[in-house]
Amino acid sequence: MDRIKMDTTMKSEGTSGGRVVFLDWLRVIACFMVMAIHSSEPFYLGGEAPNVTFIANKWDAIWISLVESICRVCVPLFVMASSYLLFPLKRSTGEFFRRRLVRIFVPFVVWVCAYVWWFGDSWGKACFNFPDAGGHLWFVPMLLGLYLLMPLLSPWAEKVSERELRGWLILWLVTTTFPYLRRLWTAIYGEPPFGAVPYLYGECPWNMFGMFHYVSGFIGYMLLGFWFRRFVPELSWRRTIAAAVPLWLAGAVVMGGGFYFRIPEFPCSKPYAFAVDLEMSIEYCSVGVAIAVIAAFMLIRKIKADGAFYRRIVRPLSEASYGTYLLHMFVLLAVFDAVRPHCNTPATICVTAVTSYVLASAAGVLLRRIPFVGRFIVG
């Protein structure tokens, strides 16, 4: 009965050629948001070592805060899209992993090698983690980690009740406040020993797996996508806007305000650790982002347009979105360097994001069409 219910839900939300239409729109929107974030990051990660955090003036800070507060939902939306389609598993564990190997892991390895070769990173480091020049590739090991969990959680997901799942999601939402609890800890008790982040609920120098470790992080977005598919009915546009707009605004205020008002002065020149701390309110698994993601998913879920523009533009871009994500830093860095001397901050962010998206998407679509090997390059 649950499987029939899920299949009925998928049909009610619109399909085209076996695809869920709104998820194609979601991937296109989220991919562009990634470009926008990466086009704004050089304005606060653009100093020379050791002062790699540099914000020139108040207006730069305002534009960075606006872009982050609107677009930071991008990565969680990708996770929710994967969960919406794949969880709980509909295939055997072996077949699921084989498909993910070809679709996700092999292109990841290809582009890790490309970034190491082009930017001269260490091959040795690339064997243990993503290369420095391909910092955005952190997303792939995280996603693969969620795929490793899906077979374990699928039997539970097949029979879980809405009330039980909602309880786990509430618990997860509590963990998204932990970046702020760590800040509160520091304000009250000072920095912990050994220069580590403040420890919470069982964490200590010899154990980083505290009480809430296994119910925190991106697994919440995986469960959130499943919750929307299984249990959340689609609302009318009026009710969707009434619920989603205040949620997104609340999340944006937490994200943008938490970023902007913690900048001590202008110009601001600080070590890299300051940028890490400054990003507390825009961490992907923090409460402001989580609230905004729920709103964004509600709104994008309402998109049903599947006409000629969808078939000719949106669907091909969506199908190539993973490859676009993998390769886009090759394009974006060059575009930013070319645009920055001639434009002010908002124009630089806008032109870099749009141009990078167009060029990287075109490359992704073309590479994907290469016979036999295209899927191994861009998924």
Image: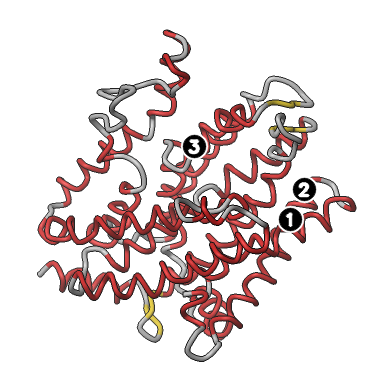
Q: On screen, 4 above or below 214?
A: below
- Residue 283 bears which disc, if any? none
Distance (Cα) linking label 2 and label 1: 6 Å
Amino acid tagged 2: Pro
Q: On screen, 52 above or below 337?
A: above
Amino acid tagged 3: Ala
State the residue at coordinates (31%, 39%): 216
Amino acid tagged 1: Cys
Q: Are marks 2 and 1 in contact (CB under 8 Å)?
A: yes
Question: Helix, strand, or loop for circle 2?
Answer: helix
Q: Position of residue 76 (x, y in %)?
A: 43, 52
Distance (Cα) linking label 3 and label 2: 23 Å
Q: On the picture, is 224 further left or further right than 187?
A: left
Residue identifier under label 2: 346
Residue occupying the far front of the picture: 124
Query: Mark 3 vs mark 2: which is more N-terminal?
Result: 3
Q: Are marks 3 and 2 in contact (CB under 8 Å)?
A: no
- Residue 350 bears which disc, if any? 1
State the residue at coordinates (60%, 61%): 32
- Residue 250 bears which disc, if any? 3
Distance (Cα) linking label 1 and label 3: 24 Å
Question: Helix, strand, or loop for circle 1?
Answer: helix
Callout 1: 10 Å neighbours few (<14), some, many (20+)? some
Query: Mark 1 vs mark 3: which is more N-terminal?
Result: 3
Quadrant where the image shows the N terminus: bottom left
Callout 2: 10 Å neighbours few (<14), some, many (20+)? some
Using the rendered view, name the quadrant where residue 261 is placed.
top right
Callout 3: 10 Å neighbours few (<14), some, many (20+)? some
Q: On screen, 34 above or below 286?
A: below
Could you tell me how many numbered marks the image carries?
3
Front one among 119 and 335: 119
